Image: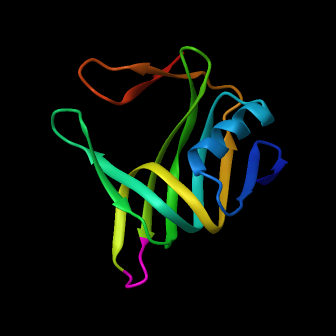
Amino acid sequence: MEWVRSGEDLFVRLDPNEEIHTSLQSLADEAGFDAAAITSGIGRTRENKYGYMNEEGVYQHRFLETPSELVSLSGNIARTQEGKAFTHIHCCWSDDDNNVHAGHMFQATVHVVAELHLRILSKAIMTRCPLADMELLGLQFS
């Protein structure tokens, strides 16, 4: 991973075999921020685990194993109550037949490259907290 900062903006390049969530969580610690908006992401990834949350608040998982174009990525980074960086990301991929796969991203490993833009929210305090009867950690502002 390499990154450059310009004011409140970070531009990040992730390289082959880097997992996106893990890399961005490490970046939050390395660059020293607690909150950010992930505004865009493109590239080519593999081992893409994604899905959606059903009516009962339980995530349903899908797996797109083959390398696919990362067409769009967005989300945010906050801290848990314990201070750990937490990424919440949604993605859209296109497989080699141009079929679209989209949803909540659980995992994605960079196959060729991923290029992402983050906007640091230096004055925001955002904390991820457990929600009753749901797998999702809710976003709380203070």
Q: How is the image coloured?
A: rainbow
Left or right, 91 with respect to 100, comes to right
Residues shaded magenta: 94-98
Name the residue located 65 percent from the left edge and 43 percent from the top edge: 24
Please state, as top left, top right, bottom left or bottom right, where the C terminus lies in the image. top right
Q: Quadrant of residue 27?
A: top right
Name the residue located 83 percent from the left edge and 48 percent from the top edge: 5
Q: Nearer the viewer, residue 1 or 38?
A: 1
Instruction: Please tell me whether residue 96 belongs to the stretch shown in magenta.
Output: yes
| Image location (x, y in percent) of residue 113 | 67, 67
Name the residue located 44 percent from the left edge and 19 percent from the top edge: 129
Tell me which secondary structure the magenta stretch mostly adopts.
loop
Left or right, 139 with respect to 110, comes to left
| Image location (x, y in percent) of residue 54 | 20, 41
**How many numbered marks appear?**
0
Q: Quadrant of residue 126?
A: top right
Left or right, 137 with respect to 121, comes to left
